[in-house]
Amino acid sequence: MCKSCKFLSNFRSILRRSLNSKIPNFLLIEQSVCRCVRILFETNAQSCPELIKQSLEFEFLEFLLEILGENFLQKSSKADLIKAIKSMEKNSIFSDKISKILDSCQIWDEFKTQSHDLFLNDVNLHTPALRAFMEVSRSDLPYKQYYCEENIWKFCAYCNNDDVIVVFVSNDDEKDYHVFAILDHKVYDFDTTLEFPCSFEKYFCEAIKFDDNLKSEYHRKFRIIPSGAYLKHFCSDRRHMLDVQSGVYTKEPPPWPAIIYDGKVNNLNEFRRMTPKDNNLIDQISIVLDTRRFYEHFMRNKSNN
């Protein structure tokens, strides 16, 4: 079990013991522990699927919802826990399970639309990473035509924002693919003729559309990967662009070095692949959806924000 996961059980026992014993310094402990929970999930909800998995297995989400309904919690502590829950909900792999739990909880209905940032005394909405992202334009970013997977990898590194979601789109044939990113219900696609960024609704309706008029073999599938996991695990030596006989690139490569590290040279095909494999790392850090579920997934996330 990872250190972050061990913290979950410790938090539960610390908060409960403090409440039951009514110790004088409880308010200070409450504030510190709730703030740690928020930071834990804000930092790791996307990049550590095991944390979310353990949270669900420990019924930690249900515990957070339970204590949100308690009158003893300060507003700032409740705000920290609300923010932690919303960070959990953004995890692309377990969002369906988390949303199901939240939708069935009457307590959550009272808090899900609350402007909880107003009660946080240490929230910085103007960090350099956030400012850089808000001001980003296509011309500011590294780009090389025909290398969409590297363009998006560079985009994730530039934004340094765990809320960015990477999307590989292909089909069971796996002969062609494309890669783009989504953040705050906006699509960042370097190769689209639509605006950059483009609202998810417009991008879906004009660039993707449903598969109803396509033959079944051309139905699309979408692999969704948290940006932190993509930055950590993706690698490519660009062999897919090399002519086998001549060894010459069929398309000029980007000016930056190939994304290779720790002896890993190429797993692009694992991200392009839309059929599951047993005990495969890429399948563990991502989720594959068909076109309709992909649309419903992001439309539901919009309504929850």
Image: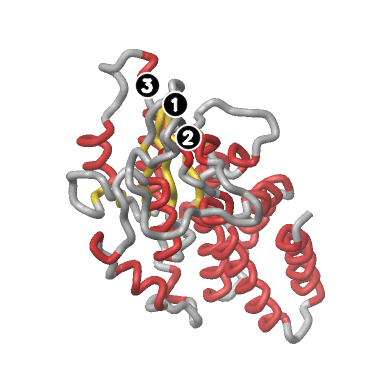
Q: Is residue 46 visible?
A: no
Between 299 and 207, the one nearer to me in the picture: 207
> Which mark, by number, is residue 219?
3
Q: Are circles 2 and 1 on residues that touch, CB within 8 Å?
A: yes
> Which residue has dot 2 on it?
272
Q: Position of residue 105 (x, y in %)?
A: 55, 47
Label located before the other in sequence (2 or 3): 3
Between 102 and 198, the one nearer to me in the picture: 198
Residue at the location (57% across, 40% down)?
97
Within 10 Å of the Cα at label 2, are there few (<14), some (14-19), or many (20+) other Cα atoms? many
Q: Quadrant of residue 215?
A: top left
Residue at the location (50% across, 43% down)?
103
Three-letter amino acid code at the position of disc 1: Glu
Q: Gap in Å between the C-alphas at discs 2 and 3?
A: 15 Å
Label located before the other in sequence (3 or 1): 1
> Which residue has dot 1 on it?
174
Q: Is residue 181 above or below residue 26?
A: above
